[in-house]
């Protein structure tokens, strides 16, 4: 409790302070134990980076499972072993940063999963509702968790494109995030009567909706 309430102003960083207290309970003043804990958090983050990258790559055009898994693994490994990570992992106080990142990565995974479900026409809000508590836990580690909306916006601008619903059933293997572009292309082809590609009927181009 003393560690949790050690900050006198603002929210502070109670979760990293609690982790330091637990380290002290097990390791005393031996710095090796603190570094092992910091490395463990970093390895978990590397795994989350791998999962997040694999999920993002699977939503891109021409996604191939095996290739995407290898690519995500290589990028995550490069991130995990980059020399810039040395001070973040081995400086005990930087666990505030790595723990904050852990909760942000979890929030991004739930956000991506929820938004993908929405693009498929399914309920995504239960997954999205998990994001604010995770971000709050990240803020309890370090204020850099406040960047989560920026990361979510980057996903929307590049991958998700603010799609909230994809009418109709998706074809087998089709990415729900690409369906909107295909539908727009169909409308464009329909607007050119002389085009040889104009073979779509109105029922194929315009999705049916209840009440219309």
Image: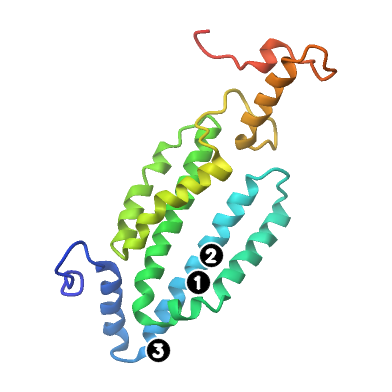
| Residue at which label 1 appears | 43
* Residue at (73, 50) in percent of width and height: 64
Secondary structure of residue under mark 2 = helix
Residue 95 lies, in percent from the top left, at: 37, 74
Secondary structure of residue under mark 3 = helix
- Look at the numbered discs 2 and 1 and tell me whether their residues touch, using CB distance below 8 Å: yes
Label 1, residues with CA under 10 Å away: few <14, some 14-19, many ≥20: some
Label 3, residues with CA under 10 Å away: few <14, some 14-19, many ≥20: few
Of mark 3 and mark 2, the one earlier in the sequence is: 3
| Residue at which label 2 appears | 47
Disc 2 to disc 1, C-alpha distance: 6 Å
Q: Is residue 210 left or right of residue 34?
A: right
Residue 143 lies, in percent from the top left, at: 31, 62
Q: Is residue 198 left or right of residue 3?
A: right
| Colour convention of the picture | rainbow
| Residue at which label 3 appears | 32
* Residue at (14, 69) in percent of width and height: 8
Disc 3 to disc 2, C-alpha distance: 23 Å
Secondary structure of residue under mark 1 = helix
Q: Quadrant of residue 194?
A: top right
């Amino acid at each position: 409790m003393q560690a949790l309430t050690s900050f006198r102003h603002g929210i502070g960083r109670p979760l990293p302070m609690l982790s330091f207290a637990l380290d002290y309970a097990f390791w005393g003043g031996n710095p090796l134990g603190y570094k092992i804990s910091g490395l463990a958090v970093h390895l978990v983050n590397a795994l989350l980076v791998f999962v997040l990258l694999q999920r993002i790559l699977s939503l891109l055009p021409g996604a191939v499972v095996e290739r995407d898994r290898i690519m995500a693994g290589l990028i995550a490994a490069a991130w995990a072993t980059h020399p810039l990570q040395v001070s973040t992992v081995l400086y005990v106080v930087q666990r505030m940063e790595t723990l904050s990142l852990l909760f942000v990565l979890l929030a991004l995974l739930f956000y991506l999963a929820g938004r993908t479900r929405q693009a498929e026409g399914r309920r995504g809000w239960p997954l999205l509702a998990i994001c604010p508590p995770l971000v709050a836990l990240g803020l309890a580690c370090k204020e850099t968790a406040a960047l989560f909306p920026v990361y979510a916006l980057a996903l929307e601008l590049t991958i998700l494109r603010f799609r909230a619903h994809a009418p109709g059933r998706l074809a087998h293997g089709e990415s729900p995030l690409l369906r909107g572009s295909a539908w727009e292309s169909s409308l464009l082809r329909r607007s050119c009567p002389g085009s040889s590609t104009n073979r779509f009927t109105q029922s194929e181009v315009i999705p049916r909706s209840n009440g219309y």
